[in-house]
Image (cartoon, rainbow, N blue to C red):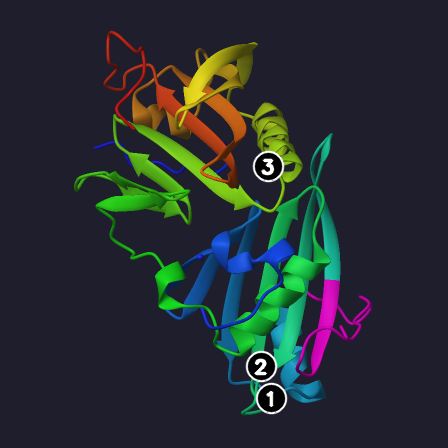
Amino acid sequence: MKIINLFFIITSTFCFSQENNILERLSALNNNGKIWYNIDGYSVTSENFKNTFDEKGLKKVFKKHNISDSETKVKDSQIKFNNLFVTKQQKISENNLQINNYYFVENPDKTTTVVWFIKNGKTDKETEEKLVNAIIENKIPETNFVPMKITSIDFAGRKIELGNSCYWTFLNTVQCPYLGEMNWSVHKTLEDAKEAIENQLNVTKSRKGGKVTSEEIVNIDFEGVPTKSKKVIYDFTGVTSALAGMSGGKFLTIYYVAENVRNKNVSCVMSFWNNDQINPDTKLPPL
């Protein structure tokens, strides 16, 4: 079985405004006490610590997240609980900055919760604040959570049956060995979805261990919607790569698409190896 992680190429009773109903775009996964969330192209985690929300307790939590004494810590007035906010930037490619926004929040029992937002490109403070408040108030419905073991997925409002061979490599990133892989996110705006796929493509181009040998715009049918996608060939030929070695493949075909489907703004990156099971008529794998 081919087991690899292609992350790099890769919704209540709570009242939200109609303009930014985060629960319609949010998915969540509970993994051994740490909860992962996906929304608007963000990767988000929340984790509870027994440390008290004071100088002594926070010092240990800051250290765990590599937050130094010199980094600016401010209170966010839109968070309903005592908190400190820290933002950091990390250059991951020539054209991409990864933004890390940390919310250190005091729980009602005086312990500390850290909500960590990671995103490439533009961030949305309002969405972050709404999600933090919902997390601390425990107002994320169970319907937003996905199981660790999957036989089907909710893909932007459509149930897709997968069988028993597929698994998460990351939240909203599904791999089906020899049958394809995809990652996706639901966004507040279509513009944000388009930015997300461009950022993923830029990250792919910046990775070592392979190279983009072909890039073109193609017409596709995405969830019943005629649209355009960027099609990329990522070649490992002649390159020593653990990724290619584990897969047995020589190159990846990758489709980057952003479109409005079922009134949801979706970014999606779909990929498959040259030795995956390909339908001779569609030239695509089952997933």
Q: Residues within 10 Å of mark 1 (few under 14, many from 20)?
A: some
Residue contact at pointers 2 and 1, CB within 8 angstroms: yes
- Depth check: 227 or 208 in front? 227
Taking the image as shown, residue 150 lies to the left or right of residue 18, namely: left
The residue positioned 49% from the left and 54% from the top of the image is 24
Asked if 192 appears above or below 237 in the picture, the reply is below
Looking at numbered disc 2 in the image, what kind of residue is underneath it? Thr
Q: Is residue 225 magenta?
A: no
Disc number for residue 193: 3
Q: Which residues are magenta?
A: 67-86
Element marked by disc 3:
helix
Query: In the figure, residue 221 lies in which quadrant?
Result: top left
Give the Cα separation between the discs numbered 2 and 3: 32 Å
Q: Which residue is under mark 2?
A: 112
Q: Residue 127 in the image: x percent, y percent?
A: 64, 58
Disc number for residue 52: 1
Looking at numbered disc 1 in the image, what kind of residue is underneath it? Thr
Q: Quadrant of the N terminus?
A: top left
Residue 258 appears in the rendering? yes
- Depth check: 195 or 212 in front? 195
Q: Residues within 10 Å of mark 2 (few under 14, many from 20)?
A: many
Question: Closer to us: mark 1 or mark 3?
Answer: 3
